[in-house]
Image: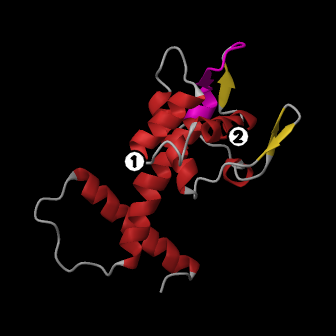
Amino acid sequence: MDACFVSDDTLENLPQPAHVGQTKVGGIDLNKPRMRRVADAMLALSSSPTGFTASDLAQKARAMSGETDSTYGARRAAYDIKKLRAKGMVQKIGASHRYQPLHQGLRAITALVVLREKVIRPLLAASIRPKADSKLSNPTPIDQHYENLRVGMHNLFTELGVAA
């Protein structure tokens, strides 16, 4: 990568409380299922040319997770949007109740979600299962990349003295 998508302190600062105006709001913890669903829903709504509302975000998050209206509604979505605003990831569109993701915020959330779901999760899963003696009969290029990552991470952990 030529450019850094996520600054070096983003992971440490996201879970910390922040302010929107005078209002203090909680941080963004992508280890919590609700915030992962919010991030996924925000990414899905990011291409809307007119932005999105709290109701739109709630509806998309519920559709992606199968939750009911009473579990995650517009009120909780509005609070989650406020947290995203406090971290500079979304902004209000004028005086409306519509929001749009900021370019840097969209890049950061996308990078964090992709790293968590497509890199870290498969590597952790591969690290806890024993190495298979048999190879896949028709490995795809992605399978080969994951295997290279797994081997590389194992070598790194061994070198650091943290591999079992």
Looking at the image, the residue that sits furthest to the left is: 137
Indicate which disc residue 83 carries.
Answer: 2
Give the magenta part as a residue range. 94-106
Q: Is residue 137 left or right of residue 68?
A: left
Q: Is residue 83 left or right of residue 100?
A: right
Q: Secondary structure at mark 1?
A: loop
Count of number-bearing discs: 2
Looking at the picture, tell me which residue is in the foreground, 69 or 77. 69
- Tell me: residue 9, above or below residue 130: above
Callout 2 amino acid? Lys
Whole-percent x, y for residue 89 in the image: 65, 33
Q: Is residue 71 left or right of residue 26?
A: left
Q: Is residue 102 magenta?
A: yes
Looking at the picture, tell me which residue is in the foreground, 48 or 130. 48
How many C-alpha atoms fall within 10 Å of the one at disc 2: few (<14), some, or many (≥20)?
A: many
Callout 1 amino acid? Gly
Q: Is residue 9 left or right of residue 139?
A: right
- Residue at mark 1: 66
Residue drawn where x is 51% and y is 75% of the image: 157
Q: Is residue 149 visible?
A: yes
- Tell me: residue 131, above or below residue 151: below
